[in-house]
Image: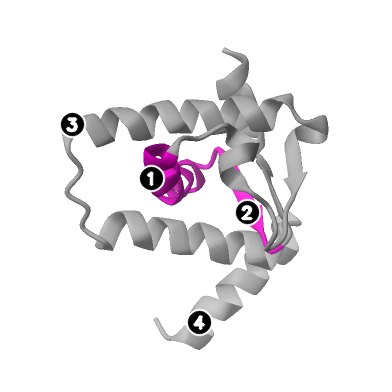
Amino acid sequence: MTIQDLQKKIDEIATYENIDQQEIINGIMANLEIKYKKANYSEEDKKLIEELKTKILTKLYSLPEHKKLINHMTKFDELFGLDKLEFKLLNNAFNELEAEGDVYSLEYEIGLKEQGIRKTRK
């Protein structure tokens, strides 16, 4: 598969599934980070990432329409109520949620997908 084939597939999925191309690309990137970037987390960090995932889902669920407009000024530590250690692992937790299909990220917005809403309601 070439980059052009990948772009065609992204275009096809975006059109037929009515999904923003950036959301698809961000999902691919999240999967690549998880699958190929070898992270040797300690057991403590693994537990913290799971707790962070719950914190992210809960916060996004509490927002109107389960989404948040973001920009370069967004303070994610304040948005999600994170300490320094949690903030350090935030990207890892968000990538896992994105790869699992629970959240999406666009250039100026993050939010819950239907699966993330269902998971949070449980």
For the residue carrying disc 2, how many other residues have a C-alpha within 10 Å: few (<14), some (14-19), or many (20+)? many
- Determine whether the residue tagged by mark 2 lies in a helix, strand or loop: strand
**Discs 4/3, front:** 3
The answer to whether 85 is drawn above or below residue 39 in the figure is above
**What residue is pinned by disc 2?**
105
**What residue is pinned by disc 4?**
5
- The reply to whether dot 2 and dot 4 touch (C-beta < 8 Å) is no
Q: CA distance from mark 4 to mark 3?
A: 39 Å
At horizontal 48% and vertical 45% (from top left) the residue drawn is: 94
Q: Earlier in the sequence, mark 1 or mark 2?
A: 1
Q: Amino acid at mark 3?
A: Glu
The disc at residue 81 is none
Can residue 78 be seen at all in this image of the molecule?
Answer: yes
**What residue is pinned by disc 3?**
43
Q: CA distance from mark 3 to mark 2?
A: 27 Å
For the residue carrying disc 4, how many other residues have a C-alpha within 10 Å: few (<14), some (14-19), or many (20+)? few
Q: Amino acid at mark 2?
A: Ser
**Discs 1/2, front:** 1
**Discs 2/4, front:** 2
Q: CA distance from mark 1 to mark 2?
A: 17 Å
Q: Amino acid at mark 1?
A: Leu
Closer-to-camera residue (56/3): 56
- Segment tinted magenta in the rendering: 84-107
At horizontal 76% and vertical 56% (from top left) the residue drawn is: 18
Q: Earlier in the sequence, mark 1 or mark 3?
A: 3
Q: Earlier in the sequence, mark 4 or mark 3?
A: 4
Query: Which quadrant of the rendered structure holds the N terminus?
Result: bottom left
**Discs 3/2, front:** 3
Q: Earlier in the sequence, mark 4 or mark 1?
A: 4
- The reply to whether dot 3 and dot 2 touch (C-beta < 8 Å) is no
